[in-house]
Amino acid sequence: MNQALEHLAEKLGLNEPAQELLRLRFGYACALRVSHFIEEQAVADCLSGLGRFLGGTIDRAHLEEQAAQAARLANRHQGSRSIDGAGHAAVSATYAVAHALAGKALQAAEYAAYAMVYGQGGYGAVTDRESFEPEYRWQLSRLSSLASESGET
């Protein structure tokens, strides 16, 4: 749990309807950061769809289709039988994409942090809070930056 990020999100009113665009942008940034762990092209395509929505090239109906597809893909991910962390990183990255598309930015950030830690340190690293700190700092900085760009701070 990234308490500093949650505090900033609360301060910004991130879960308020008026902050949807900020939620989508932040979720997209977090999911994009772990996109190299994505194993299925269909998941990458969903993430690309969010980018296209944010860029104004697809409409909300298409975004909603992409969000539904990402949720289906995340929920059927086969997971990993290994303990090296690579498969776990892929699962977490897939869930980060699904939550980003659903506008659940803090959940996307949490899954993205797990993907980074699994990918860099393997399964055992997730029990060490310190291993999350670099990603938590990046997330806090990124949300702060996005909020400043949109005039929210």
Image (spheres, rainbow, N blue to C red):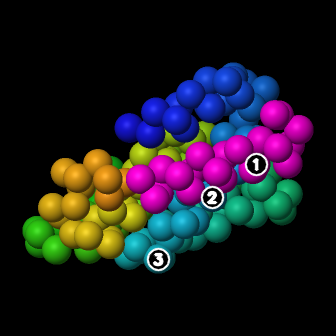
Q: Which residue is mark 2?
A: 29
Give how far apart the Cα atoms at labels 1 and 3 are: 22 Å
Magenta range is: 133-153
| Element type at mark 3 | helix
Q: Answer yes or no: do the residues labelled 1 and 2 have beta carbons within 8 Å?
A: yes
In this rendering, is residue 128 above or below 48? above
Q: Where is residue 91 drawn, in percent x and y?
A: 32, 61
Three-letter amino acid code at disc 1?
A: Leu
Q: Nearer the viewer, residue 8 or 65?
A: 8
Residue in view at x 16 percent, y 74 percent: 84
Q: Which residue is mark 1?
A: 146
Among the two numbered marks 1 and 3 on one chain, the one whose residue lies closer to the N terminus: 3
Please state if 41 lies on the left or on the right of 62 as rendered: left
Three-letter amino acid code at disc 3?
A: His
Please state if 144 lies on the left or on the right of 1 as rendered: right
Residue in view at x 47 percent, y 77 percent: 36
Please state if 93 lies on the left or on the right of 18 as rendered: left
| Element type at mark 2 | helix
User: Which one is closest to the eye, mark 1 or mark 3?
Assistant: 1
